[in-house]
Image (tube, rainbow, N blue to C red):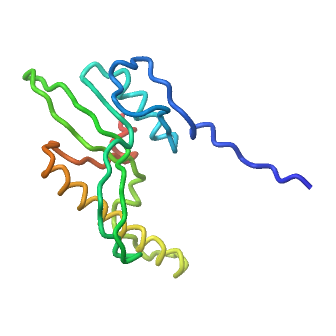
Amino acid sequence: MFIKKKINKNVGQFIPRNPNKYVGKYPIIVRSSWERKMCQWLDVNSNVIQWSSESHCINYFDPVMEKRRRYYPDFFAIFRTKDGGQRKYLIEVKPYHETVPPVKGRKKESTLRQQELNYLTNSAKWKAAKDYCRKVGIDDFKILTEKEMFKK
């Protein structure tokens, strides 16, 4: 018997139209449709000077696993500002519900517990990312959700 596997067409590689702006390693791996959309936007946006994918390694303490781990934010980008300057950002792309503490509602206890653990891990990663940015001179760490990515 064959098991039919669902293929996610948004997971895979991204090939930039403007390879001179991309300063990371190849191939550029995308893990979701939102990451693909972000790659496309960074690639064609005239205010983006340079960008890379998963190029910064940040050490953090995972409170759930109780051990040191490594975190690779989704993107790094240098933007041109209106006054002719530059701003550097580390960017994480996440669904909004993963950026706020979970609410019980009508969820199973096991689902709520897993969401709480994910939120704790993500919070530790994001705190470490903000500290890392301060240490290495990156202007800010941004978390982009569907609320920012798909506003009209």
Give x and y (percent) for residue 103.
40, 73
Position of the N terminus, as image quadrant, is bottom right
Residue 115 vs residue 124: left or right? right
- The residue drawn where x is 51% and y is 76% is 106
Residue in the picture at 83% in, 53% down: 3
Which percent across, then down, holds residue 5? 75, 49
Q: Quadrant of residue 152?
A: top left
Query: Residue 90's x, y, as percent?
Result: 27, 44
Circle count = 0
Vertical order, 60 against 64 (above or below):
above
Image: 116 above or below 76: below
Query: Which residue is found at the position 36% from the left and 38% from the top?
Result: 151
Judged from this view, the residue extending furthest toward the right is 1
Can you tell which quarter of the image residue 68 is in?
bottom left
Q: Quadrant of residue 123?
A: bottom left
Above or below residue 73? Residue 28 is: above
Q: Residue at x 50, y 38 (%)?
A: 29
Q: Percent from the top left, x then y, of residue 130?
A: 20, 55
Q: Furthest residue to the left?
A: 83
